[in-house]
Image: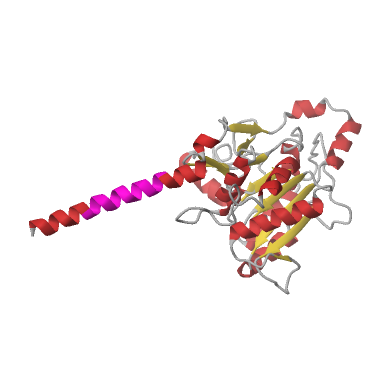
Amino acid sequence: MLSESSSFLKGVMLGSIFCALITMLGHVRIGHGNRMHHHEHHHLQAPNKEDILKISEDERMELSKSFQVYCIILVKPKDVSLWAAVKETWTKHCDKAEFFSSENVKVFESINMETSDMWLMMRKAYKYAFDKYSDQYNWFFLARPTTFAIVENLKYFLLKKDPSQPFYLGHTIKSGDLEYVSVEGGIVLSIESMKRLNSLLNIPEKCPEQGGMIWKISEDKQLAVCLKYAGVFAENAEDADGKDVFNTKSVGLFIKEAMTNHPNQVVEGCCSDMAVTFNGLTPNQMHVMMYGVYRLRAFGHLFNDALIFLPPNGSDND
């Protein structure tokens, strides 16, 4: 009996050591710690409104026209109701929005990626966008169909960012040595980052189609690994008060949390006034957000924004 117990304990110990070893190897594989340049995590903030007011009216108009955002939405057939809601709401405010699906769907126009693997879909979508639109758009925004985006706030946030620099931003998360932008809140890449990513897509040692690990990692982590090889690092987007502007939760959930954690400061404890995205929305919630963000107005109250981003030509946006 004692020998059986001893064998059992030895087995448990060896199993634990093996799991710990695999975990350590996993972190080394993701982080590439010794092969990468040291990078301090950045917290990027939106421009100061006072600085915008210093720009002449002609320059502001030129700025509003020069910002071109191409939106990529990754969808699957089971997302058809969300797909419809996204198409009818916020994507109308993108300069161009296209849906990339895992298979051919007759109900909606989309680009068939012929795979249900999210990382392969993301890779193919980025390559398609770069090959076809690299000379037309300077910013590329990728989102899931559960995400609601306020494109004008995105453009405002990017106002003083140079797209010829390697930007990769959104809501950052740290996993071991790897810092990545969560796809739940949306991912923004500048044209320079797209160039660098595109140059690595055919180099499996640096940007494999399948993760070189025992277990599969998420598509947003895979993207971060590839970009890290290209010298592009994740950066967290915040407002002037340090609040996240790319959110991985819905407004309703943020309000519930604020009511619990900050009952006397529900609004202040909730979200940024310049929020770019919210995630985890149902189709009905998408339409409610559209109403609140774009349609509801207080009569007699004028909004004197220093800069106006005009809708795309021919758009039927709200």
Total marks drawn? 0
**Can residue 318 be seen from the camera position used here?**
no
The answer to whether residue 40 is above or below residue 295 is above
Question: Which one is in front, 10 or 99?
Answer: 10
Horizontal side of 94 relative to 148 (left or right) equals right
Task: Examine the image and state in which quarter residue 304 appears.
Answer: top right
Magenta stretch, main secondary structure, is helix
Q: Position of residue 58 (x, y in %)?
A: 91, 33
Q: Is residue 216 above or below residue 181?
A: below
Image position of 15 (left or right of 177):
left
- Which range is magenta? 11-24
Percent of width and height locating residue 150: 71, 48
Residue at 66% over, 68% down: 114
- The image's colouring method is secondary structure
Find residue 72 and report its horizontal and vertical position in percent.
71, 55
Q: Quadrant of the N terminus?
A: bottom left
Residue ranking furthest to the right: 58
Residue at position x 61%, y 61% in the image? 282
Residue 64 in view in this figure: yes
Q: Is residue 162 left or right of residue 4?
A: right
Above or below, 37 against 77 in this view is above
Identify which residue is drawn at 19% across, 53% down. Answer: 9
